[in-house]
Image: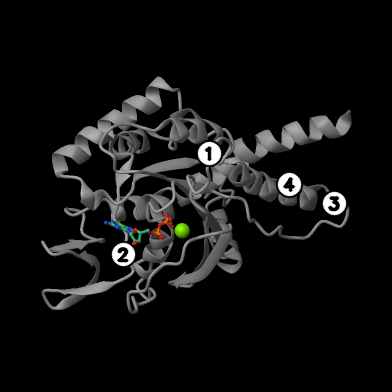
Amino acid sequence: LEGYVGIDTLTEQIRKKALRQGFEFNVMVVGGAGLGKSTMVNTIFKSKVSRRSCQPDEEYNTPKTVEIKSISHVIEEKGIRLKLTITDTPGFGDHVNNSNCWQPIIRYINDQYEKYLNEEISIRRRKRIPDTRVHCCIYFIAPSGHSLKAVDIEALKKLVQVVNVIPVIAKSDSLTLEERQAFKERIQQDLADNHIRVYPDMDNLDLDEEEINNNVELMNRIPFAVVGSTASHLVGSKNVLARKTRWGIVEVENSSHCEFIHLRDMVIRTHLQDLKEVTAQVHYELYRHERLETLKE
Ligand code: GDP
Ligand code: MG
């Protein structure tokens, strides 16, 4: 083994360190009032995020969200700890004047960058900075079947500048499959026409060919058509997260019913590390750069 340096042993070192430290991952839900954001927060935690996921309990009425609020759960699987935090926000459209309704959200996102920056530049720097930066913003679009509203376009334009945004079609059980597909294509066109670059923005990623192909497939599915529910219903012999209507049952975690699992898998499985890296290397870096420039003056 002449010339063997042993770089391969690094993988094990990195793995051990990651295991010890665990991961912090922060998601935020944003969009119009009544689109099922709070329900979705609970849906994610109650779904099979891990084998030992929180069991669904009785259906309850989600109170109206009046302030920005975070819920955290530590998910542990095979010795790996993931601290998943989801931040719920009050919906747009609750006020007479909706201009700048996204400002409190942008402020919250920037506040987390500011906290991180202050820790980084402080003289007595902590060994490990708590990371409250928002790694992913799930943006809820009303299932109107028409096109993006002006307020959505304005809000999205602002948001994509500071955070990774993944748009979803809310309450998609109200659309037929044909309507859903047509609406999806319309939104994709609206996003392109308005130069709104939602995640995954290929330019920001460091990908190999296989990953690029996977991403193209994924991008065609965005915005994911989702359904949320905090209630479980019996389907066959199993209790599953679902919405029960007079016509039948819509299963949240059934990909022939909606695209919830595509969203969840992308966010907390396939693209988790990527979302964290883009947050740190693109969005936070931009914030840091601008802040340090103003501090110099
Ligand atoms: P938020 O204002 O965006 O937080 O919306 P909520 O989560 O409070 O939900 C508003 C209402 O929509 C509640 O009555 C929910 O039960 C209902 N809801 C939530 N998700 C869905 C969904 O996927 N489909 C349908 N049809 N209704 C939903
Ligand atoms: Mg709410």
Real-space Cα distance between discs 3 and 1?
38 Å
- Which element type, helix, strand or loop, lies under badge 3? loop
Query: Which residue is label 2 attached to?
Result: 229
Residue 8, given in percent of the width and then of the height, sits at 52, 52
Q: Residue 212 location in percent, x, y?
A: 36, 33
Q: Which residue is mark 1?
A: 98
Q: Alpha-carbon distance for marks 4 and 3?
A: 12 Å
Horizontal relation, residue 58 to residue 27: left or right? left
Tell which circle, 1 or 2, labels the residue nearer the N-terminal end. 1
* Label 1 neighbour load within 10 Å: few <14, some 14-19, many 20+: few
Q: Quadrant of residue 279?
A: top right
Residue at 29% from the left image edge and 43% from the top image edge: 143
Specify the amino acid type for callout 3. Ser
Residue 130 x %, y % = 68, 59
Q: Amino acid at mark 4?
A: Glu
Residue, disc 3: 122
- Percent position of residue 133, x then y: 62, 51
Instruction: Say whether mark 2 is within 8 Å of ligand 1.
Output: yes
Q: What kind of element bears circle 2?
A: loop
| Quadrant in which ligand 1 is drawn | bottom left
**Number of the front mark, 2 or 3:** 2
